[in-house]
Each structure stands twice: as C-alpha cells, then as structure tokens.
Image: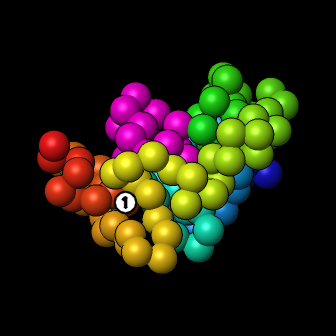
Amino acid sequence: MLNLLKDLQGKLGLTYLFISHNLAVVDYIADRIMVMCAGQIVEVAPCGVLFSNPLHPYTKALLTAVPEPNPDYRLAFDKLMVEKASMPSAWPAPFTVNESERPGLIDMGEGHFVRADKALMAA
C-alpha cells in the first residue's frame, strides 16, 4: 500500500496528509514531518533534519520507539508510557506545557520548528 501511495505521489504530484505513530513509515512516504502530542504540534521539520537533529523530548522518545527506521520492525511504545513522554506537563524546560506555561513554535532554521519557551531556549 505504501509503495502504491509513493508511486502515485511521484506520478501525479500528489500531496498527502499521512497520519501514523510509526516514524519509520512516515519517513518512507513524507518529505516533511509534523510531530503532534496532546493535540499540539511539538516539532516540524524536513525528514532528514528531524531524524538527524530531533529537539523536542517527545520527538526523541518517538524515535527511540523506532530503533531502526524500517516498517518491518516492531515499535516499542511502552517506553513512551513509562517515561511519561506523552505528558506535556512532565516535559523538561524549555518544553514544559501546563496551565502557566504555553510555549510557541520557534524557528530553528532549515524549515525546522520546535515548541519551546524562546527565552529559555536561548539561554
């Protein structure tokens, strides 16, 4: 199915909104990746940039759940739950999101954006 989608994308110039928890699959089909958690965008970047330089703790946790970017490998999502990676209030500064902290997206260059507190990110 993924091969068919990729072939159609190339032949017809299609754009997809492809949603998956498996970043290996997303890497295969996407040019850019938007990582979301708890209904918020936490990181956006071209595939190569995101895989080589993930900045947000949730993105890093997702990547550890996919030890090798291969759709045939089983995902290890249990680590995400144990380390509370999907809980915005548990993320370390400057990424913490809670009642009093609502960081925005920061442009890191090369089309790479991360949700973080700009003042703390610069420190």
| Above-or-below relation of 8 to 74 | below
Residue 80, by quadrant, is top right
Label 1 CA crowd tier, 10 Å (few <14, some 14–19, many 20+): many
| Bounds of the magenta segment | 46-60
Queried whether the magenta region covers residue 72, the answer comes back as no
Which SS does the magenta portion mostly show?
helix
| Above-or-below relation of 63 to 92 | above
Image coordinates of residue 11 in percent, x first then y, are 53, 56
Q: Residue at x 70, y 34 (%)?
A: 65
On the question of residue 96 being in view, the answer is: yes
Q: In which quarter of the image is the C terminus?
A: top left
Image coordinates of residue 25 in percent, x first then y, are 67, 43
* Numbered-mark total: 1
Element marked by disc 1:
strand
Query: Closest to the observer: 116 or 114?
Result: 116
Q: Which residue is drawn at 62% across and 68% down?
A: 38
Q: Which residue is drawn at 49% across and 69% down?
A: 98
Query: Closest to the observer: 13 or 94?
Result: 94
Queried whether the magenta region covers residue 48, the answer comes back as yes
Residue 75, by quadrant, is top right
Query: Closest to the observer: 52 or 14?
Result: 52
On the question of residue 11 being in view, the answer is: no
Q: Pointer 1: what residue? A: 115
Badge 1 amino acid: Arg
Return the residue found at the far top.
Answer: 68
Q: Residue at x 60, y 38 (%)?
A: 61
Residue 20, by quadrant, is bottom right
